[in-house]
Image (cartoon, rainbow, N blue to C red):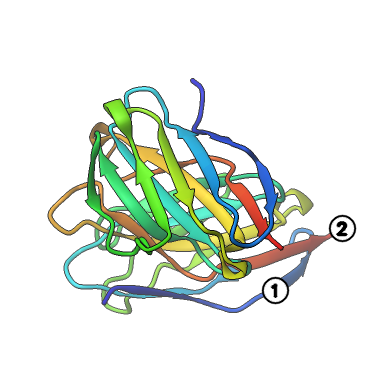
Amino acid sequence: GNSVTQMEGPVTLSEEAFLTINCTYTATGYPSLFWYVQYPGEGLQLLLKATKADDKGSNKGFEATYRKETTSFHLEKGSVQVSDSAVYFCALSDRGSSNTGKLIFGQGTTLQVKP
Amino acid sequence: EAGVVQSPRYKIIEKKQPVAFWCNPISGHNTLYWYLQNLGQGPELLIRYENEEAVDDSQLPKDRFSAERLKGVDSTLKIQPAELGDSAVYLCASSSQGQGNEQFFGPGTRLTVL
């Protein structure tokens, strides 16, 4: 079945460091890919998405490129801030016959940014 | 625009007791999802509604869990009786076909079963 694998955390970085969180997926067909972020005490928020191969999603300085050949959707940011400290989830859509199918999530990666 | 509303935010009960969670989706969103999030894990789908119809409940433990979405708007998820292993965060999300598959999540209900 479809699945998502993320790099294990926690990831601890200093402010202004470069961030990469790896995400690979297994899927039949052509799913959409997502990164969600969960700040402490808050619900999941969509960070960015890509709906087809070679698409690049970007938001708030974060970006990720849908790589079909390597089945990857790695999250990157050039210069992290303390406020980026959160848990990041990679996910794919499992549409089935519907365009509103369930999301399949990775296990999450905790990012801690120190001043 | 108001987001997805869930209540209560926190619930502590003793095992074998019943518990219910409520969700009000974003206005106009016809698809509603209930996810279970165990500590340190990603959310997993329990049930998905299209309007008032449950179209995917394959992951819902039907011996103790039930859900309803009367009138195709808000929804209730119930556990009866609760077990220790049910301690988790229960997330509700909604989406609209007009927005593709972007799902909007509520803050969740954190359940602790003692």
Q: Nearer the viewer, residue B21 or A79?
A: B21
Figure check: A71 above or below A65 = below
* Residue B43 point in image, percent of width and height: 48, 60
* Residue A74 point in image, percent of width and height: 47, 68
How many labels sit on residues? 2
Q: Secondary structure at mark 2?
A: loop
Figure check: A11 above or below B18 = below
User: Which one is earlier in the sequence, the residue at label 1 or at label 2?
Assistant: 1
Identify the residue shown where x is 71% and y is 47%.
A41
- Amino acid at dot 2: Pro
Marking on residue A115: 2
Residue B31 location, quadrant: top left
Q: Secondary structure at mark 1?
A: loop
Asked if residue A59 can be seen in this view, the reply is no
Identify the residue shown where x is 49% and y is 20%.
B1
Q: CA distance from mark 1 to mark 2?
A: 16 Å
Residue A111 location, quadrant: bottom right
Q: Quadrant of the C terminus of chain B?
A: bottom right
| Number of residues whose C-alpha sits closer than 10 Å to that of mark 2, classed few (under 14), some (14–19) or many (20 or more) | few
Marking on residue A10: 1
- Amino acid at dot 1: Pro
Asked if residue B86 can be seen in this view, the reply is yes
Identify the residue shown where x is 28% and y is 43%.
B49
| Number of residues whose C-alpha sits closer than 10 Å to that of mark 1, classed few (under 14), some (14–19) or many (20 or more) | few
